[in-house]
Amino acid sequence: MCGIAGSVSLGHAPVHAPYTSAACAAMAHRGPDETGSFVTAEAALAMCRLKVIGLHDGSQPVFSDDGTVVCVLNGEIYNHQELRDLLAARGRPVRGGSDAQVLPHLYQEFGEHFVERLHGMFALAVHDTRRDRLVLATDRVGKKPLFYARPAGGGVAFASELPALMLHPGIGRETDPVAIDQYLSYRVVPAPHTIYRQVRKLEPATVLVLEAGRPERRRTYWQFDFTAELTDVPQAEIDDRIDALLQQAVQDRLESEVPLGAMLSGGLDSSLVVALATRQLGRPIHTFSVGFEHAAFDESEYARAVAEHCGTRHHVYRIGAEDAREAVDTILTHMGEPYAFPSAIAASCMYKLARQHVTVVLTGDGSDEIFCGYGRYQRLRDLPGDSGLADRYEHVLADGVPHPLKNRLYAPDFAARIPGHPHNYLRARFDRTDPSVPDLDRAMQVDSRFWLSDAQLVKIDRMSMAHSVEPRSPLLDHRLIDYVTRVPAARKLVGANEKAPLKRVAARYLPASVLERRKQELAVPLESWLGAELRSSISDTLLSEASLERGYFRPDALRSAVREFRPEHTYALWTLYMLERWHHLQENGTAREAAAVAHV
């Protein structure tokens, strides 16, 4: 794992070289073990490295043999040994033992299409000095982030994290009203938007090519293709194929030269990953979970039972309201923009615990979007079909600030800056799905390119990297996804039984108690905390002079919503609070960031 950053002039003014050093210093949590850089008048690329593979010969940037191609990588390429064999057979032997070292040679052999041969999680940059070309690329699912902008003066700058990119002096800080409107509905800022008007996120499975004197070229090289075509395949055949693909996915993610463990919530997904990993390794591993004093949210006893079944060395951290209070600023600092999923509190605590024992962890993330595992899919299925699919799903999915409350809160001048307000942003996403496919499959496809990458994977990446831990998610293996997305939703959600094929596979490795208990997503007792321990903090923040003068909301309407403190508005209040708290941190941090660049 690494943090990467860069600035390329693309024929414009020389790059601002101090930016990359400052950016990597700001991302030292992503790569505390080593730094490296490549600097010319036309380009500056840098990285900070968390050593996992190639401990002694895996430094970055990496170069082609002739020195004309330079690359930086954040992530892991799981099939790098196969790629070495392929390149050697084509007359391009690769030196060194790290996965990153295959990249410049692969680019020279296959051009910008080289990313299609990569299996893994990655965000990368390739600078082709002969063509004055920069290639930015992300993995298929969106596990690793990449932010970019066109600074004043020309060229392009990029970084693994938004706060690091904002250290570039040529990038403005004007916020984007559309991004804020989307955030208030969904509790995240969906790609390609960021909270800043000038900055964009590179979406999953995307190759962006930028060359001097030419318009940028963008290409999507893979997609979640929910075809629902495996209607007549026998159940046993489907189960066997899923089992084999999942075993391979776990095996591919066990390579590590540093200690490896696993997250274990006690639910189906993480339990299955732990069971497969311990069987393949043939030895105990460390596992990690969190618990709560509120019994309705506490899964720790289930996690402990699975740990005993699999013979792991299990560790538990018990979360209280004070942990939540302390975690808020950590979450917003590493996100670099508003983010209102309170489960990030639990994730932060879990990765902090894991870092005390290991550097790499396996996780069970990623199954719900492809196996029809969320409760909202049942709610969508049961809704009357008297409106369009996008409108019905908006009613289910948009659980931040509800549209009626948003309309009551918005200041007229701010609402006027949002085109088409009130706007259902899901319509454009559903327009890109196949209308001949059943509604649930279309909903999963939308979630896979939105909810998964912008909500779930953002949380996993930032909270793990905040504590210098590398997460690996076998259920997000693209070969497994390619198969499971061909299985119709009706074969995954059977009555009230969600993820039916995965449960049948898990029954081969886990006790019935894990499979039969009610699904419980990673959550925190937010309503209780907001009504008691965190209430004064939230009220003071939202009713501060800065908040009331922000210009987004009518002051009287905001005062009323905060003082009412209605239980049904729990997520709305948290969403509003995280937006204003982000502003506070941003305003207090700008001077420090400017000083950091000035002193590099």
Image (cartoon, rainbow, N blue to C red):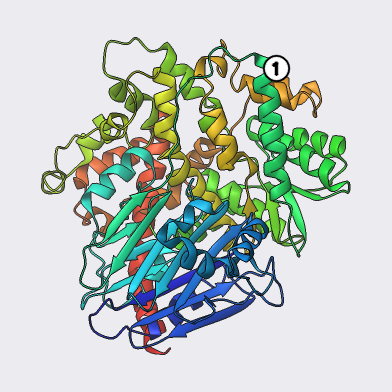
450 shown above or below 55:
above
459 shown above or below 381:
below
Foreground: 542 or 235?
235
Residue placed under numbered mark 1 in the picture: 236
Question: Which residue is painted at 19% across and 53% down in the image?
Answer: 551
Task: Please indicate whether residue 415 sits to the left or right of residue 52 in the image.
Answer: left
Question: Which residue is painted at 46% across and 63% down in the image?
Answer: 333
Foreground: 484 or 63?
63
Residue 38 spot, x, y in % from top left: 47, 83
Quarter of the rendering containing residue 355: bottom right
Task: Please indicate whether residue 442 sits to the left or right of residue 311 in the image.
Answer: left
Q: Quadrant of the C terminus?
A: bottom left
Quarter of the rendering containing residue 598: bottom left
Question: Which residue is painted at 26% across and 44% down in the image?
Answer: 181
**Label 1 element class:** helix
- Tell me, yes or no, if residue 215 can be seen here: yes
Residue 151 spot, x, y in % from top left: 25, 73
Label 1 amino acid? Answer: Ala
Foreground: 23 or 320?
23
Question: Which residue is painted at 32% across and 11% down in the image?
Answer: 385
Residue 483 spot, x, y in % from top left: 56, 30
Foreground: 128 or 530?
128
Task: Please indicate whether residue 305 sits to the left or right of residue 238 in the image.
Answer: right
Task: Please indicate whether residue 78 sits to the left or right of residue 328 in the image.
Answer: right
- Tell me, yes or no, if residue 368 can be seen here: no
Label 1 CA crowd tier, 10 Å (few <14, some 14–19, many 20+): few
